[in-house]
Image (tube, helix red, strand yellow):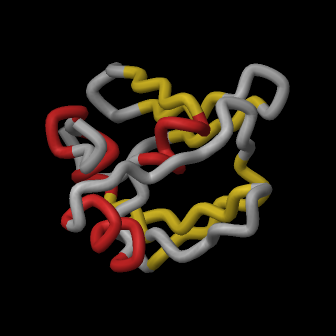
Amino acid sequence: MSALPERIETDAAAGTLTLHWPDGRVDEWPHALLRVACPCSECRAVRRGGAEVVAPANVRLTAIEPVGQYALNFAFDDGHRRGIYPFALLADVRTMPAW
């Protein structure tokens, strides 16, 4: 599988982000899960401290910005916009920090 998705879609009504990969695989992520799994240093510190990152179930993405050729930066309607989500992280559910 290529490290870059062919297509990135977000559905605010459903609260989902969909990534279409060159090998035909399609991954769908709830916005709330992406927020809870944020890999930024602030959210990692919360998890390292034994707490959970909390986000409302209805949190939505407000912006998706590319970070070079390797990641996406998401802005959420709760004001959080620091997490850089590498495509490798988004392509492998087992690497999501919340799991």
Residue drawn at (49%, 63%) of the image: 72
Q: Quadrant of the C terminus?
A: top left
Report whether 80 appears left or right of 90: right
Report whether 75 appears left or right of 51: right
Q: Is residue 70 above or below residue 35?
A: below
Residue at the limit of the structure toward the front, as seen here: 50
Residue drawn at (46%, 47%) of the image: 36
Q: Is residue 78 above or below residue 15?
A: below
Foreground of the two, 26 or 73: 73
Residue at the limit of the structure toward the right, as seen here: 13
Q: How many numbered marks have been drawn onto this rendered protein structure?
A: 0
Picture coordinates of residue 74, whole percent (x, y): 59, 62
Picture coordinates of residue 12, whole percent (x, y): 80, 33
Q: Is residue 27 above or below residue 52?
A: above
Picture coordinates of residue 87, whole percent (x, y): 32, 54
Give the image quarter of residue 24: top left
Foreground of the two, 52 or 8: 52
Residue drawn at (18%, 38%) of the image: 1
